[in-house]
Image: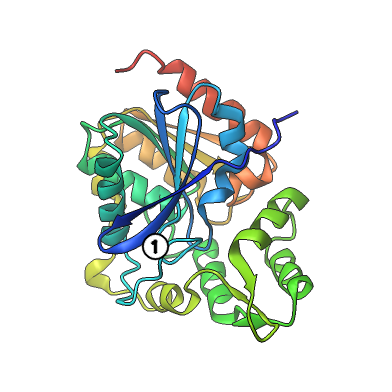
Amino acid sequence: MQKKPTAGADRFTTLNGLRAHYVEWGEPDAPPIVLLHGLRSYARTWEPVAAALADRHRLIALDHRGRGDSAWDPAGEYVTDAYVSDVEQLADALELRRFTLVGHSMGGTNAIVYAARHPERVRLAVIEDIGPGSSASGAGAERIRRELERTPRAFAGRDEALAYWRSVRPDISQAALDSRIDNTVRAAADGQWVWRFDLEGIARVRLDPDPARTVDLWPHVEALRCPTLVLRGARSDFLPAATCAEMAARQSLLTWQEIREAGHYVHDDNLDDYLTALREFLDRHQDRP
């Protein structure tokens, strides 16, 4: 049985002129792990992971711009270079000289790009269910586009918001669903429930991306200089097993593993097996400087 998630400490800083929120668990002098969430997610999605690792690590989960308690970007810069720049400034602000980087989906893209650009800072990387081409084509990419196009802009109440999340995530656990409601919607003054993330700005960029600013992950995968673990949900419609195999073929430092009974949201769908794989990877490389 996993530990009950701990609240973590809310922190704020400024990244590229925007107020940014992050959550911190563990002792400040413990080995640091930075956690990056996905497209429509939030820092506290990592609470169950943090609860399991906080006895040995310092965990820092960022609310990417436009999500959670971080400021929305008035310029709509919801692109990889902006996210990675935010992580660069966060690492500098917290004086993280060497750390492990974990990212899910969009956060995994940001983790790969940051690790490739800063091999001197990243000792280990863990990438959850994303790889080159995942966001551009395939069943999962099409599903996310459809969901963004059809997402209601508001709900009559909390129950309606809960029903929406259940409809797009039918296999989600109750704990993960409660977390998602607590962190993605809020009651407005008029009685409706509205999104806590910048749906319009995020959807605009995701549905009509600028080809000149779309990141090709293959050169970044090939540029990695740290041991990297890719965790694929065995039922994922987003990251094909063939892509994982090609990533490992192109990058000798990269290994991959499937997590059974999990889709794209691996740590939500099968937390126990996710944590087993993560702990084994961390322990295997515990002596890496």
Residue 162 is situated, as x and y percent measured from the top left of the image, at 74, 67
Relative image position of residue 14 (x, y in whole percent): 31, 56
The answer to whether one can see residue 215 in this image is no
Residue at 35% over, 51% down: 110
Q: In the figure, residue 212 lies in which quadrant?
A: bottom left
> Count the marks: how many?
1
Q: Residues within 10 Å of mark 1 (few under 14, many from 20)?
A: many
Q: Position of residue 199 (x, y in %)?
A: 50, 75
Q: Quadrant of the N terminus?
A: top right
Asked whether 172 or 35 is in front, the reply is 35
Q: Is residue 129 visible?
A: yes
Residue ID at (60%, 31%): 275
**Colour scheme employed for the rendering of this structure:** rainbow
Tell me the residue at 47%/53% (across/down). Answer: 105
- Is residue 45 left or right of 33 when viewed as pictured? right
Q: Is residue 142 left or right of residue 169?
A: left
| Residue type marked 1 | Arg
Q: Which residue is mark 1?
A: 65
Q: Residue furthest top?
A: 287
Task: Tell me the quarter of the image containing the C terminus.
Answer: top left
* Secondary-structure class at tag 1: loop
Does 67 sit left or right of 171 as displayed? left
Q: How far across and down, in percent of the image, does residue 157 sit?
A: 75, 77
Residue, x 67% and y 54% (percent of image)? 179
